[in-house]
Amino acid sequence: MDFAPDERTGLREMLDYYRAVFARKMHGLDGAQLAQTLGPSSLTLGGLFLHMAGVEDGWFDDKFAGNDPPSIWADVDWEENPDWELDNAHTFTPEQLLAQFNESVERSRTIEAAATSLDQLTERSGRKGDRRNLRWIMIHMIEEYARHCGHADFLREAVDGVTGD
């Protein structure tokens, strides 16, 4: 990691750091462990992995690049079930969850690398008609991973006692 990076390199490295921390939380767990909850929450590690795959695709592939959603998301009725990925992760094997996460992250990396500048705006606007730049998306993604890495820390420790990044 570069400790005096330019802006884009710094954003890219921090986002990739959190992606890697997040991915390590799943390492070595089976389907039952990925579906285990903590306390009164229904949140699972498997649900978080499918959620973050969707967040990657939603911001980079859909909003920023303006592409149609990959097949996994295309037929979901988000109005009927806005938490579809969290509610259905248990129907995927650990290998499928990891493959989807890795595929979504790689798609995001490719889109980010092809962007001309951090100032480049999304192809699609948000619900209020706003268009965000790549800089905002990368900062937002770092925030998303930082928050969900914390959730994953608690869930992983409850599953098998493993702690740390």
Image (tube, helix red, strand yellow):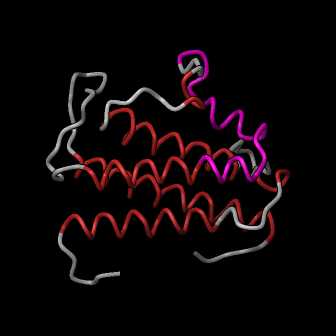
Question: Which secondary structure class fits the magenta region best?
Answer: helix
Q: Position of residue 140 (x, y in %)?
A: 34, 50
Image quarter for residue 28? bottom right
Q: Which residue of the protein is positioned furthest toward the bottom in this rendering?
A: 3
On screen, residue 43 versus residue 140, left or right, reads right
Q: Is residue 121 magenta?
A: no
Q: Which residue of the protein is positioned furthest toward the right in this rendering?
A: 32
Residue in view at x 54 percent, y 24 percent: 74
The quarter in which the C terminus is drawn is bottom right
Q: Which residues are magenta?
A: 79-100
Q: Is residue 39 above or below residue 68?
A: below
Residue in view at x 63 percent, y 68 percent: 24
Residue in view at x 59 percent, y 63 percent: 23
Image quarter for residue 152? bottom right
Q: Position of residue 32 (x, y in %)?
A: 85, 51
User: Closest to the observer: 37 or 65?
Assistant: 65
On screen, residue 63 versus residue 132, left or right, reads right
Number of numbered tags placed on the structure image? 0
The quarter in which the N terminus is drawn is bottom left
Q: Position of residue 117 (x, y in %)?
A: 16, 52
Residue in view at x 39 percent, y 62 percent: 15
